[in-house]
Image (cartoon, rainbow, N blue to C red):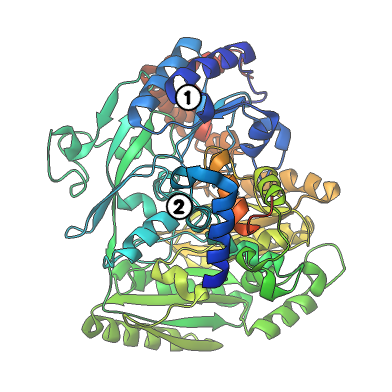
Amino acid sequence: MSTRFAALALATAVLSGGALAQEPDGKVLFQRHCAMCHNASGMGTGLLGRRMKPEVAELEKREDLSAAYVERFARIGVLNMPPITRGEIDDSGLKAIALYLSRGRP
Amino acid sequence: MATQPEVNAAAASRALKAIEAIVGADAVFTSQEDRDAYSDRFPVDARAHRPAGAVAPLTTEQVQAIVRVAAENKVPLWPISRGKNLGYGTSAPVLAGSIVLDLSRMKKIEIDVENATVLLEPGVGFYDLYDYLQTRNIPLWLSVPGNSWGSVIGNALDRGLGYTPYGEHTRNLCGMEVVLPDGDIVRTGMGAMPNAPTWNLHKYGYGPAFDQLFVQSNYGIVTKAGMWLMPTPECVLGFDVEMDRMEDLGPLIDTLGPLRREGVLQQSPTIGNWFRAANILTTRKQWTDKPGSLSDDVIAAIRKQFGLGWWGVSLRVYGRESIAKPSLAILEAALKAINPMAMKPFSWHPGDAVTPSAGGWMGVPMTFPLQSANWFGGRGGHIGFSPVLPQSGKLALEQFQRTYARYKEYGMDYQASFAFGERHMLNVNAVLLNLDDPEFMKRVDPFLRTLIADAAKYGYGEYRAHIDYMDTISDGYSFNNHALRRLAEKVKDALDPAGIIAPGKSGIWPAAYRKGAA
């Protein structure tokens, strides 16, 4: 994982230009706002595991996410995932999470 | 209340605009998508509770200022802590058109390790507090509910439940800071004494104790609350017990009740039926394609696959091993006398791993039980009917038999638990929803109203309700021409003459909304 994170950090750095120091950290925010359902034993992983290979049901293991897809589904909710309100996480924080999960793919 | 009053939409828009000056435009949410996001996710009727928008303050001062704006414009606020009250309305208000006051950004944690207390803001979730304690190696435990996605304070303020000796969460509250409907701020208990070091240690202070007045009510907005935490025990020992027959519920309750009252059992055991694993780990289609309640054949197959009795219960004793071991021996002897189908021992000591399925009894937050929302394979959810019963095996068995017959009559799959308090039990009946099946959803409301009416005949009322049923449940608490509700209304009108805090919460409506009510 550490290699992936390094690659991601680089991608994030490129995307976010010179303002990296002020940018929210997608991995940290993912842990804080998403991991309860999308870690190994979470509800989201359990249910996604019914629709895809369980070994890639954890969002952090997915290779096929785009940032736009993550942002959209988080905001409107999908199937049994409730929408994530802007009060809980603002747009810039969600964008950082989405870029983290998509490994920089917009 | 037969028909809901309407909120003045123009006034709500004015208030939302004015609140932008308090919290900033980027913390005021009014788009259609925002309004949907703050609506009920497990709805019986999704249209009934759509808010006008939401606002997300960061500080108590901002909450005070928002309350004043709401009062000036006579627009109701619906405070939420984290808005994860799934099955009870999620973040949606009783009254459509209200403004959701989203406190999820208020996340301060002040720990007192020595005294095993914590002072929390409402945005602190179970996972936030768990991570805070774990990363600092603080030897204190939470008690967590079956869905631990929500707020620690919010759950205690709605009288949520967990599974450890600290499982009756509202009892862990000790001292609050509350913004009143006029924008004033009060600290309860010892907190009223400036600089008192005992705010979160002594629950009553001097004179009337107000904490429970702000629980399941609409008298103020709790912006901080003290909670007692459990010192990490030297060990956790116990048994996972399965009972074979449905009639075994009575003897099981009559065995556990005296041990709970005596204090041999200090946790709150929850007896659950055979359905509790299948609806999390599988979908209905894996068992049957027939409509109606699951048949006895299917129930037998489910029990066989998961090795379950008709009823099961996990019992735990906590603390010093020199006390826990003899307590466990007492439990074991009592249980063996009622011929359990299985008794699997459980043992944990510091340093041992905790599996997710055992975490609930160890204060480890979890979300996997919410997988039951996918029981029908698509969009789902749950709603509950949870009357309060005495700890009587006979009465509980009779209540179970009546309820189970209704589940079959309405074609619902039976999921129930009997959760012990110290003197009472909560009979939590879950109705798993199939939001993709309109015909199914049409049966849900009449089914719940039938359960409510059945139970009321025996004096059993609910401890907590979904926003659609708050008035109905309140109606049942009717001694002396609804004297309790009339008292609640007098208090409401005195504290909140503009009627702006959560009108309709727990069936309490302010005067402005009672006029013209049916």
> In the picture, residue A34 is in which quadrant?
bottom right
Location of residue B88 in the rendering, given as x and y in whole percent from the top left corner: 58, 45
Q: In this view, does A96 lie above or below B370?
A: above
Q: In this view, does B341 lie to the left or right of B192?
A: right
Q: Is residue A19 left or right of residue B182?
A: right
Camera-side residue of A76 and B206: A76
Q: Do the residues labelled 2 and 1 touch (CB within 8 Å)?
A: no
Element class at badge 1 = loop
Q: Which of marks 2 and 1 is in front?
A: 1
Location of residue B236 in the rendering, given as x and y in whole percent from the top left corner: 34, 79
Q: Which residue is drawn at 36% across and 61% down?
A: B142
Please tell me how crowded label 2 is: few (under 14), some (14-19), or many (20+) other residues with Cα within 10 Å: many
Element class at badge 2 = loop
For the C terminus of chain B, which image quadrant? Answer: top right
* Chain bearing mark 1: B
* Chain bearing mark 2: B
Q: Residue at x 26, y 28 (%)?
A: B186
Q: Residue at x 21, y 47 (%)?
A: B200
Which amino acid lies under the numbered mark 1 shown in the image of this protein?
A: Gly
Q: Which residue lies under the disc numbered 2?
A: B160
Q: Can residue B489 be seen in this view?
A: no
Q: Residue at x 38, y 21 (%)?
A: B181
Camera-side residue of B486 and B180: B180
Location of residue B22 in the rendering, given as x and y in whole percent from the top left corner: 43, 21
Q: Which residue lies under the disc numbered 1?
A: B24
Q: In this view, does B193 lie to the left or right of B167?
A: left
Q: In this view, does B469 lie above or below A12?
A: above
Q: In this view, does B94 lie above or below A71?
A: above
Spatial separation of the CA atoms under disc 2 and disc 1: 33 Å
Location of residue B72 in the rendering, given as x and y in whole percent from the top left corner: 45, 10
Q: Is residue B508 visible?
A: yes
Camera-side residue of A15 and B321: A15
